[in-house]
């Protein structure tokens, strides 16, 4: 999957492009991703050959690396939005799917760390769906 994606943070202070192929798109349910995202999972694209270019705001980035794990979060200092980073231990650019501005029709490769998923995650089948806030 060779593509070029563009993305930004919520406040617009940081903008980037990712050029290159994406090898995987994981929905991670580990407890660290739950805490970091404030949700049931993180949704990340992984690109081994991708080139990450900062168009604006690189100096506004903060990176947190959780001790003794691979867990890393890069985010905007102003609005806290999750942003891409290079994870050297797996030689990949990791791109939070929610930070993308460009259309992405990639289908998630896998849900990972399902043993750690939130207890309520398995009870969503009959939950009402709305296009806007009801």
Image (cartoon, rainbow, N blue to C red):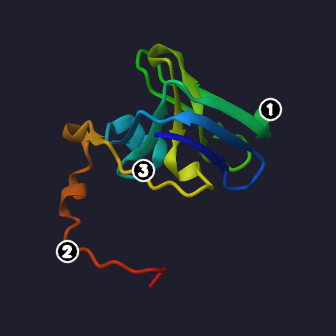
Q: State the CA–CA distance, disc 2 to disc 3.
A: 26 Å
Judging depth in this view, the residue of 85 and 4 nearest the camera is: 4
State which mark lies toward you, 1 or 3: 3
Q: State the CA–CA distance, disc 2 to disc 1.
A: 44 Å
Q: What residue is rendered at 77% in x and 34% in y? A: 58
Residue 132 point in image, percent of width and height: 48, 80
Q: What residue is rendered at 70% in x and 41% in y? A: 16
Q: Is residue 80 visible?
A: no
Q: Name the residue that disc number 1 marks.
A: 59
Labels 2 and 3 touching (C-beta < 8 A)? no
Q: Residues within 10 Å of mark 1 (few under 14, many from 20)?
A: few
Q: Name the residue that disc number 2 marks.
A: 126
Q: What residue is rendered at 50% in x and 48% in y? A: 97
**Against 119, is 57 above or below?**
above
**Against 12, is 58 above or below?**
above
Snapshot quadrant of residue 122: bottom left
């Amino acid at each position: 999957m060779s593509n070029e994606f563009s993305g930004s943070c919520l406040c617009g202070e940081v903008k980037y492009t990712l050029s290159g192929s994406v090898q995987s798109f994981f929905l991670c349910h580990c407890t660290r991703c739950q805490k970091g995202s404030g949700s049931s999972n993180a949704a990340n694209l992984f690109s081994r050959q991708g080139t990450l270019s900062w168009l604006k705001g690189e100096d506004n980035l903060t990176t947190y690396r959780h001790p003794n794990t691979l867990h890393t979060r890069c985010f905007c200092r102003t609005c806290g939005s999750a942003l891409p980073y290079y994870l050297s231990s797996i030689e990949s650019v990791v791109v939070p799917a929610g930070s993308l501005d460009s259309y992405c029709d990639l289908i998630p490769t896998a849900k990972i760390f399902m043993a750690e998923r939130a207890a309520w995650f398995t009870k969503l089948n009959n939950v009402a769906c709305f296009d806007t806030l009801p």
